[in-house]
């Protein structure tokens, strides 16, 4: 039997907690990758996995990504992540959320959670009844930071995507730029609207037909079959769904010069960053470009500023990407490897 320490996605995680509550049906994995810079912060994903091993891999990869994301965003936070293993019906009850909140509370502040795929602001409210170690709660009447992190993630991706287009295509705006967006969820929808407002031509795919049709009607996008979105001939591919979609086969079939999207863990393996570089495709490392959401909820949790500070921190994302691309160009290493090395230095793992 393979031990946890031998799992390929295990990266010297500080702790991995397996949570079970039989009364509510809760099964969850809370992975804490690093607390070098502060409490491990990262959202909770509610998802049905065909195999438990896939859930563990997701938790391990996502938590490492949060360590890197928070470090590269200049936040005083470490990295962690939770996956709640949903059943096929994706049954979620108030009792299950309460049990999860108690599990988070038992960690004593070493882990701070927020929304991720399958979770909502209302879910965070339910969890907050059991623990203070939660962010992404509704914005208060004063209009301070908080609430759904999706729009903030989308804004950061939009700014980063524009920086990539300027660097690779020499264009200062998105007018006429063809962007293929994989996904039509919260982040993808906000991103699509930003891009459409600036005159971009959009192709969009999502497994939820009703959702993608609504977004296409709002933005004038062309709807593409989900199986074909990665092979659309466009200026930019923006992955905004689940991860590990860039692998040896899919990279060989790409017809874009730029990849800039919100999905976590877009590269299936480290070698895939090298494959993109070999094809002269400019890649925006996912945990750098998609940091807007954690910037917003961390500012809420840390209470170290207001909306202006959130906007200021998000506006710094393009500059961080340019720094990575500059070092990639001068060193010959691909941008993903450069970003990883930077993040590892920041969390004391150089």
Image (cartoon, rainbow, N blue to C red):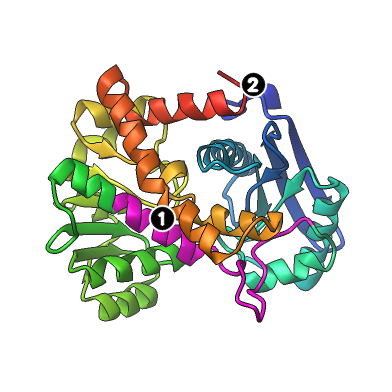
1 vs 2, front mark: 1
Kindly identify which residue carries mark 1.
156
Q: In terms of sequence position, does the residue under pointer 1 or pointer 2 come before the other?
A: 2
Position of residue 64 in the picture relative to residue 180 (left or right): right
Q: Percent position (x, y) of residue 121?
A: 63, 70
Q: What secondary structure is marked by label 2?
A: helix
| Quarter of image, res 245 | top left
Q: Can residue 255 be seen from the camera position used here?
A: no
Highlighted magenta segment, given as a residue range: 133-161
Q: Quadrant of the C terminus?
A: top right
| Quarter of image, res 18 | top right
Position of residue 148 in the picture relative to residue 279 (left or right): right
The residue shown at (67%, 35%) is 37
Q: Percent position (x, y) of residue 345?
A: 54, 23
Sort mark 1 into few (<14), some (14-19) or many (20+) by Cα contacts within 10 Å.
many
Q: Quadrant of the N terminus?
A: top right
Sort mark 2 into few (<14), some (14-19) or many (20+) by Cα contacts within 10 Å.
few
């Amino acid at each position: 039997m393979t031990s946890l320490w031998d799992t390929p996605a295990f990266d010297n995680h500080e702790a991995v907690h397996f949570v079970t509550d039989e009364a509510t049906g809760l099964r969850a994995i809370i992975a804490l990758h690093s607390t070098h810079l502060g409490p491990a912060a990262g959202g909770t994903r509610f998802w049905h996995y065909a195999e438990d091993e896939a859930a563990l891999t997701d938790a391990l990869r996502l938590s490492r990504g949060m360590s890197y994301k928070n470090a590269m965003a200049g936040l005083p936070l470490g990295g962690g992540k939770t996956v709640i293993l949903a059943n096929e019906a994706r049954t979620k009850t108030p009792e299950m959320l309460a049990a999860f909140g108690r599990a988070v509370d038992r960690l004593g502040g070493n882990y701070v959670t927020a929304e991720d795929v399958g979770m909502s602001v209302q879910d965070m409210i339910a969890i907050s009844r059991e623990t203070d170690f939660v962010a992404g709660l509704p914005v208060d009447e004063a209009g301070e930071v908080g609430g759904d992190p999706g729009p903030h993630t989308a804004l950061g991706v939009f700014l980063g995507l524009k920086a990539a287009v300027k660097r690779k295509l020499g264009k200062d705006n998105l007018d006429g730029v063809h962007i293929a967006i994989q996904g039509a969820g919260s982040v993808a929808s906000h991103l699509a609207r930003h891009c459409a407002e600036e005159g971009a031509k959009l192709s969009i795919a999502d497994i939820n037909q009703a959702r993608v049709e609504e977004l296409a009607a709002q933005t004038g996008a062309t709807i593409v079959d989900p199986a074909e979105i990665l092979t659309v001939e466009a200026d930019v591919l923006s992955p905004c769904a689940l991860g590990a979609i860039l692998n040896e086969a899919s990279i060989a079939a790409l017809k874009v010069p730029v990849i800039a999207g919100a999905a976590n863990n877009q590269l299936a393996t480290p070698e895939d960053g090298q494959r993109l570089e070999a094809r002269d495709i400019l890649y925006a490392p996912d945990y750098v470009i998609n940091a807007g959401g954690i910037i917003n909820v961390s500012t809420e949790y840390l209470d170290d500023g207001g909306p202006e500070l959130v906007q200021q921190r998000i506006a710094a994302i393009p500059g961080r990407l340019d720094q990575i691309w500059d070092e990639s160009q001068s060193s010959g290493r691909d941008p993903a490897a450069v970003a990883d090395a930077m993040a590892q230095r920041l969390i004391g793992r150089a």
